[in-house]
Image (tube, grey):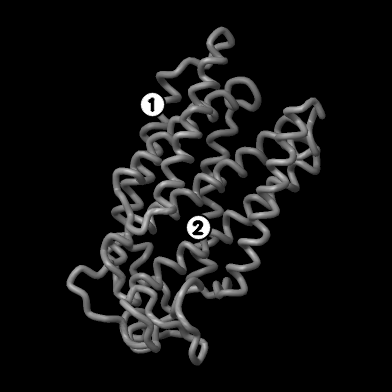
């Protein structure tokens, strides 16, 4: 299944084989659902349980262009609301508390919308775009505050760093330097769970009077923790790419493009925040 987008036009080509035909004959499979037979998985989008087979010919099957368009819409919403928040919401010291409150409120709303989508059986464009809008408000206020009071110019560096990480993961995935399988997904999920637990513990220690918490907010330990966060984000992005590749190969319903957009956007936000953390700590220590 080819795309008119030049970045994805040769998506998933490996060992000189064409993507569309080879995957329809012998699907890649996902690291999620399906029974493994001969190192391949059954079609996770088919009704009932069956053996691996060629992708069904659905009239509404998702294409790579569908994923590109939906991802562009979702990321565009994040970017637009972030820029508007940066320009319109105050960040001077007198109103800093109000800006901080807006950012935290937007972050909680975005998290709530994302959780609703996660537990829904079908993708909801309204939920996904709503999540993107409130996430953009949070990112805009946070970025403006960091740039104004902590590290001027760091936001542009973080954006470039996010693009660099994303491009590197895309290149590594297309070259098959990264092999996303069940073992990879299980390791990344376990590592991310530990990372988030440490992040929560650090916040709780800081909240209840332990100063800098566990030390993840400054110094060499803070930079190392942020680098681990970036690497985890890169791993999740590779998993997102695999999910997209499988959806196209198996002829998933077109609405799956919204789930792909949601996953990629969430991962890119994670990477941006971790890159911003690393650069802010690094610049403040020099």
Count of numbered marks: 2
Mark in the foreground, 1 or 2: 1
Residue beneath the point at 46% across and 74% down? 33
Q: Which mark is residue 167?
A: 2
Above or below 250: residue 212: above
Residue 25, horizontal then vertical, whole percent: 34, 89
Residue at label 1? 84
Q: Residues within 10 Å of mark 2 (few under 14, many from 20)?
A: few
User: Of all residues shown, which one is farthest toward the bottom?
Assistant: 38
The x and y percentages for residue 153 are 58, 30
- Residue 177 can be seen in this image: yes
- Labelled disc at residue 18: none
- State the residue lying farthest toward the front: 48
Q: Residue at x 61, y 68 (%)?
A: 186
In the rendered image of this protein, does residue 115 appear above or below residue 36? above
Query: Would residue 63 be found to the left or right of residue 88 on screen?
Result: left
Q: Residue 7 at x, y = what percent?
A: 38, 62
Q: Residues within 10 Å of mark 1 (few under 14, many from 20)?
A: some
Residue at 36% in and 70% down: 247
Residue 286 visible within the image = no
Give left or right: position of 20 versus 134: left
Alpha carbon separation for disc pair 1 and 2: 26 Å
Query: Which of the two discs, 1 and 2, labels the residue nearer the N terminus?
Result: 1
Split into 4 quadrants, where in the image is the N terminus? Answer: bottom left
In the picture, which quadrant includes the C terminus? top right
């Amino acid at each position: 299944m080819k795309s008119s987008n030049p970045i994805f036009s040769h998506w998933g080509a490996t060992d000189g084989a064409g993507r569309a035909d080879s995957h329809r004959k012998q699907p890649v499979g996902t690291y999620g659902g399906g029974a493994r037979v001969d190192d391949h998985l059954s079609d996770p989008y088919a009704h009932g349980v069956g053996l691996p087979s060629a992708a069904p010919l659905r009239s509404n099957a998702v294409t790579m262009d569908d994923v590109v368009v939906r991802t562009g819409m979702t990321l565009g919403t994040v970017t637009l609301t972030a820029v508007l928040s940066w320009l319109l919401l105050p960040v001077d010291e007198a109103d800093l508390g109000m800006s901080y409150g807006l950012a935290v409120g937007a972050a909680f709303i975005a998290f709530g919308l994302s959780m609703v989508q996660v537990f829904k059986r079908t993708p909801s464009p309204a939920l996904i775009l709503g999540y993107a809008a409130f996430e953009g408000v949070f990112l805009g206020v946070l970025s403006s505050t960091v740039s104004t009071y902590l590290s001027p110019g760091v936001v542009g560096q973080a954006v470039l760093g996010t693009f660099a990480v994303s491009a590197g993961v895309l290149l590594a995935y297309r070259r098959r330097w990264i092999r996303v399988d069940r073992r990879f997904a299980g390791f990344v999920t376990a590592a991310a769970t530990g990372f988030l637990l440490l992040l929560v513990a650090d916040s709780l220690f800081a909240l209840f009077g332990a100063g800098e918490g566990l030390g993840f907010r400054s110094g060499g330990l803070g930079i190392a923790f942020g680098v681990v966060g970036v690497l985890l984000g890169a791993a999740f992005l590779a998993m997102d790419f695999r999910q997209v590749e499988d959806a196209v190969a198996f002829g998933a319903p077109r609405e799956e493009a919204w789930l792909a957009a949601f996953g990629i956007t969430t991962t890119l936000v994670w990477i941006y925040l971790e890159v911003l953390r690393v650069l802010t700590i690094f610049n403040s220590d020099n």
